[in-house]
Image (tube, rainbow, N blue to C red):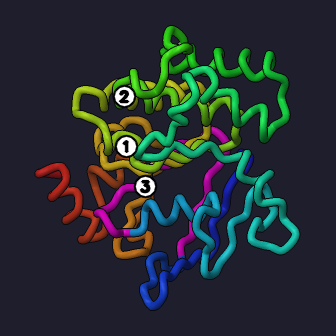
Amino acid sequence: MERILEIQHLRKSFGNNEVLKDINFSVDKGEVVSIIGSSGSGKSTLLRCINLLEKPTGGKIVYKGRNILDNGIDIYAYRTKLGMVFQQFNLFNNHNVLSNCTVGQIKVLKRSKEEAEEIAMKYLRVVGMDQYINANPKQLSGGQKQRVAIARALAMEPDVMLFDEPTSALDPEMVGEVLKVIKELAEMGQTMLVVTHEMEFAKEVSDRVIFMDKGVIAEEGAPEQIFNNPIQERTREFLKRTLKAV
């Protein structure tokens, strides 16, 4: 199994507030790893450190054998290998759907317009948004916007997709359409790291689940173990609150 990411002793502080404390885990090619935990447990900060939207205070982020926090590493080249999907879609409102999915390819990867459009169409079909290529983001529902955001990230053909609570800004009836797309990506073998509060999804789709609590990884394991037979008391407490019963 090819190891794509390895997080070693990662720490992040904002002033005196240590948000991440000695985080260690890895992601292998084709793996789906879900990160669960209460608000404020450090999940989103962890994702933002991995793609360097936040600079870690200490530790290593090893991507394909190289610590990307070392001096001399091309951070922008590294970032193109990570597809990031945010809670709030972050689409460009002055671009239509197709252009949203080509602009990064053309500017960052230096692909021709024709090639970028071909790749964009491929992934817009995957997420079921190929009928909307001329639409402006303002004309789309939240679920449609998020599916375009997923296609845009996929069009960069990253090694890992990072999802930061991709359904938290959606109306309940739109959650399913986005989770269905992520599920299909898992079946296609896409490597993914998913911060989510959708427990059924995490249980069904993940190869591994990480439970974070107060800035540490409190427990990590297969979905069956985490959800059906958690070892840690705080994991049980969290799941009891979240699922109402474990």
The disc, 1 or 3, on the residue closer to the chain's N-terminal end is: 3
Does 44 appear above or below 84?
below
Q: Position of residue 172 (x, y in %)?
A: 22, 33
Residue position for label 3: 35
Q: How many labels does the image show?
A: 3
Q: Residue at x 45, y 50 (%)?
A: 164
- Type of the residue with mark 2: Gly
* First along the sequence among labels 3 and 2: 3
Instruction: Write down the quadrant of residue 152 in the picture.
Output: top right
Give the residue drawn at x 45%, y 83%: 18
Q: Mark 1 points at which residue?
A: 202
When asked about the image quadrant of residue 175, the answer is top left
Q: Quadrant of residue 226?
A: bottom left
Within-10-Å neighbours for mark 1: few <14, some 14–19, many 20+: many
N-term mark: 1 or 2? 2
Furthest-right residue in view? 72
Seen as rendered, the residue at the extreme top is 131
Mark 3: amino acid: Ile
Q: x, y percentage for residue 76?
A: 77, 54
Q: How crowded is mark 2: few (under 14 residues within 10 Å), some or many (20 or more)?
A: many
Quadrant of the snapshot with the N terminus: top right
Cα gap from disc 1 to disc 2, whole angstroms: 19 Å
What residue type is disc 1 on? Ala
- The numbered mark at residue 34 is none
Q: Do the residues labelled 1 and 2 touch (CB within 8 Å)?
A: no
Q: Is residue 54 above or below residue 5?
A: below
* Magenta extent: 23-41
In reply to whether residue 34 is colored magenta, the answer given is yes
